[in-house]
Image (cartoon, helix red, strand yellow):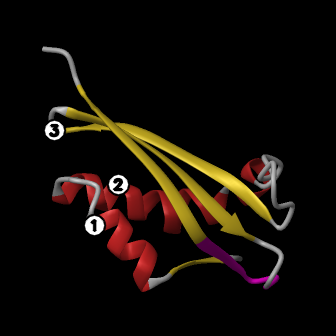
Amino acid sequence: MRRTVVSPEITRMIGECRLTRLGAVRVYAGLHGELPQRYDRYRGLRHPEDGRLFLFFDAFADGDLMHTFTFHVDDSTSAEHLIVIDLEHESRQLRR
């Protein structure tokens, strides 16, 4: 089974996203659980500018913010590893 690799730089970027502890756990559970388990489903969505990468999306409400993540994942460097090389993050206030 493939394993997800998250560098200290990506960990830092996730830490800057104003997530609660539960929100951070959700992000890492998606990266280390859902992503490798459902790799065959996600790998088809290739990055439009770099064919070595595919995109993994996650979106959820956390506290009073809606977070949307797009992770850029390299599956071409290693047959056993899914290497997260970048992320895009957006958040917006939830309506009350």
Above or below: residue 13 compared with residue 90: below
Mark 3 → mark 1, Cα distance in angstroms: 15 Å
Q: Amino acid at mark 2?
A: Arg
In what element is the residue under mark 3? loop
Please name the residue that numbered disc 1 is placed on: 15
Q: Which of the two discs, 1 and 2, labels the residue nearer the N terminus?
A: 1
In what element is the residue under mark 2? helix
The residue at the point 73 percent across, 50 percent down is 42
Which label lies toward us, 3 or 1? 1
Q: Is residue 66 magenta?
A: no
Mark 2 → mark 3, Cα distance in angstroms: 13 Å
Q: Amino acid at mark 3?
A: Gly
Mark 3: few/some/many CA within 10 Å (<14, 14-19, 20+): some
68 and 80: which is toward the camera: 68
In what element is the residue under mark 1? helix
The residue at the point 56 percent across, 66 percent down is 86
Above or below: residue 67 compared with residue 3: above
Tell me: 70 left or right of 67. Answer: right
Whether the residues at callouts 2 and 3 have beta carbons within 8 Å, the answer is: no
Please name the residue that numbered disc 2 is placed on: 26
User: Which quadrant does the N terminus fall into?
Assistant: bottom right
Q: How far across and down, in percent of the image, does residue 20 sit?
A: 17, 53
Q: Which of the two discs, 3 and 1, labels the residue nearer the N terminus?
A: 1
Q: Which of the two discs, 2 and 3, labels the residue nearer the N terminus?
A: 2
Mark 1 → mark 2, Cα distance in angstroms: 13 Å
Q: How far across and down, in percent of the image, does residue 4 sit?
A: 58, 75
In the rendered structure, find residue 63 and report the number of the disc placed on it.
3
The residue at the point 41 percent across, 84 percent down is 8
Q: Amino acid at mark 1?
A: Gly
